[in-house]
Image (cartoon, helix red, strand yellow):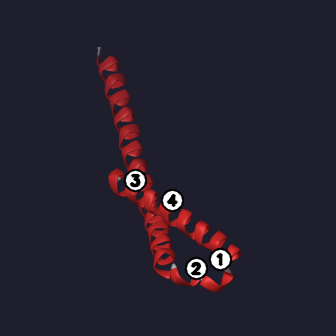
């Protein structure tokens, strides 16, 4: 999942830079209509940003589940240790 997130992050950065450069070039020469010709790159930027957000939610929920399991295991070990001490 981290490799996918890394690829999506790089796609977002590249597409953002292309959009900024197209805006600058369009400001410099408005008759070339650079912003009108990068609609595919803008769609790739939107899609990768949405997927990056979705994968972040998925990864964060997975980490929360691991932390809950870890906390419950710590509590279980603590209860087991106290039970052994009370038996002695």
Extreme residue toward the right, this view: 27
Q: Gap in Å between the C-alphas at discs 1 and 3?
A: 30 Å
Extreme residue toward the top, this view: 88
Mark 3 and mark 4 lie on one chain; the one further toward the N terminus is 3
In front here: 10 or 82?
A: 10
In front here: 65 or 58?
A: 58
Q: Secondary structure at mark 3?
A: helix
Where does the image place residue 8, in percent across and percent down from the top left?
A: 41, 61
Q: Is residue 32 above or below residue 23?
A: below
Q: Gap in Å between the C-alphas at discs 1 and 4?
A: 20 Å
Q: Are marks 1 and 2 in contact (CB under 8 Å)?
A: yes
Q: Secondary structure at mark 2?
A: loop
Q: Residue drawn at (37%, 38%), measured in percent from left and top?
A: 70
Q: Residue drawn at (69%, 73%), measured in percent from left and top?
A: 28
Where does the image place residue 26, in percent across and percent down from the top left?
A: 65, 77
Mark 2: few/some/many CA within 10 Å (<14, 14-19, 20+): some
Where does the image place residue 25, in percent across and percent down from the top left?
A: 63, 72
Q: Gap in Å between the C-alphas at discs 4 and 2?
A: 19 Å
Q: Secondary structure at mark 1?
A: helix
Label 1 sits on residue = 26
Label 3 sits on residue = 6
Mark 1 and mark 3 lie on one chain; the one further toward the N terminus is 3
Mark 4: few/some/many CA within 10 Å (<14, 14-19, 20+): some
Mark 1 and mark 2 lie on one chain; the one further toward the N terminus is 1
Q: Are marks 1 and 4 in contact (CB under 8 Å)?
A: no
The image's mark for residue 34 is 2
Which image quarter is the C terminus in? top left
Mark 1: few/some/many CA within 10 Å (<14, 14-19, 20+): some
Q: Gap in Å between the C-alphas at discs 1 and 2?
A: 5 Å
Label 4 sits on residue = 13
Where does the image place residue 86, in percent across and percent down from the top left?
A: 34, 19
């Amino acid at each position: 999942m981290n490799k996918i997130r890394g690829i999506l992050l790089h796609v977002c950065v590249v597409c953002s830079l292309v959009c900024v450069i197209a805006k600058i070039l369009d400001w410099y020469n408005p008759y070339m209509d650079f912003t009108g010709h990068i609609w595919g790159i803008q769609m790739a930027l939107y899609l990768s940003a949405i997927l990056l957000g979705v994968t972040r939610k998925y990864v964060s929920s997975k980490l929360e589940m691991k932390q809950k399991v870890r906390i419950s295991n710590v509590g279980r070990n603590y209860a087991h240790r106290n039970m052994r001490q009370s038996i002695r």
